[in-house]
Amino acid sequence: MIEISSSTLAIPETGDVPRHVAIIMDGNGRWATRRMLPRTAGHVRGVQAVRRIVEACGHRGVRYLTLFAFSSENWRRPAEEVSLLMRLFVRTLEKEVDRLEAQGVCLRVVGDLSAFDPHLRGLIEAAERRTAGQSALTLTIAANYGGRWDILQATRALLADRPDLAAHPEALDEAALTPWLAMAYAPEPDLFIRTGGEQRISNFLIWQLAYTELYFTDCWWPDFDAAQLDRAFTWYRGRERRFGRTSDQLRGAV
Ligand code: IPE
Ligand code: IPE
Ligand code: MG
């Protein structure tokens, strides 16, 4: 059983392999445009990269992998692109669940799923149920997810459960709120990777990334492979995770 701790309330255990890797899979559209292909061809290739990285993370002993598939702001894209992404999501869920189960992957989907059509919601529920007994790797897909949505939905759920807090706001603390966040089942990410060259969080896990190491690469997501992942892990091993302390304290010098 992995201990779920908060990086601001206690200093987490860290190791050479990140326990939790969170990825913004970016650059599908530009990968395709460079090849004179429609952007959607990049999304199709992106699914192959997902398959590779799930497998590579499993082999390397990562326990939690979280992939940003569709943000709460991605509805602003052209309708045809949004609908292709939804169809791809459906097709991938239909096709991949057997393989995930065989690989020992427990699938979770986080985000405001109420915006999806009932067929997709049904597939998500079935895939989660089907893989619920697996524990080698927990794969979380963030779909119609936004970090601000998450903090707001957690606050609403907490206040519904504890109406007394409205009269006693001083009793509201981190430990009360975090169990209501969408990824309360996972430790905070150790390593964040964003492909595609941008250096921003784009409303991903804004609460949970408080002490995460942030790695940015120019590699487009469809080109991201096990070798690229290893490069990120090597970089990660070189970081000194201080969580507020000094280097001397980490070395045991003081
Ligand atoms: C990421 O690739 C996939 C999704 C956001 C669904 P993009 O589609 O953002 O690719 P670029 O950034 O336009 O190249
Ligand atoms: C972030 O990528 C969301 C996903 C990868 C799902 P975007 O491509 O949507 O981010 P911005 O708009 O460039 O910040
Ligand atoms: Mg993008």
Image (cartoon, rainbow, N blue to C red):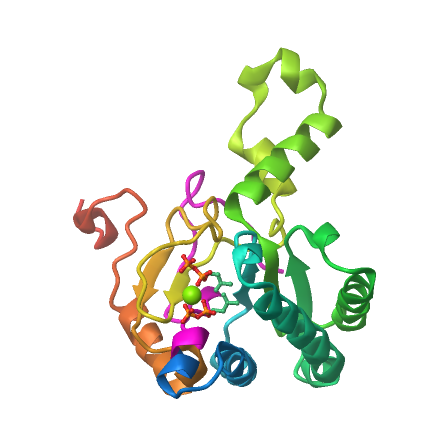
The residue at the point 64 percent across, 11 percent down is 167
Q: Percent position (x, y) of residue 248?
A: 17, 49
Q: Nearer the viewer, residue 5 or 91?
A: 91
Quadrant location, the N terminus: bottom right
Q: Nearer the viewer, residue 146 or 167?
A: 146
Is 14 colored magenta in this rendering? Answer: yes
Number of residue marks: 0
Q: Is 21 left or right of 141, judged from the image as shown?
A: left
Q: Can residue 97 be seen at all in this image of the molecule?
A: yes
Quadrant location, the C terminus: top left
Q: Percent position (x, y) of residue 139?
A: 60, 69
Report the magenta residues as a range: 1-30
Is 31 colored magenta in this rendering? Answer: no
The residue at the point 41 percent across, 40 percent down is 8
- 37 is higher (above) or lower (below) than 69: below
Q: Nearer the viewer, residue 106 or 143?
A: 143
User: Magenta span: helix, strand or loop, mainly?
Assistant: loop
Q: Can residue 135 be seen at all in this image of the molecule?
A: no
The residue at the point 37 percent across, 49 percent down is 211
Q: Is 128 left or right of 172, judged from the image as shown?
A: right
- 122 is higher (above) or lower (below) than 4: below
The residue at the point 22 percent across, 47 percent down is 249
- 80 is higher (above) or lower (below) than 4: below
Q: Percent position (x, y) of residue 220?
A: 38, 77
Q: Percent position (x, y) of residue 31?
A: 40, 81
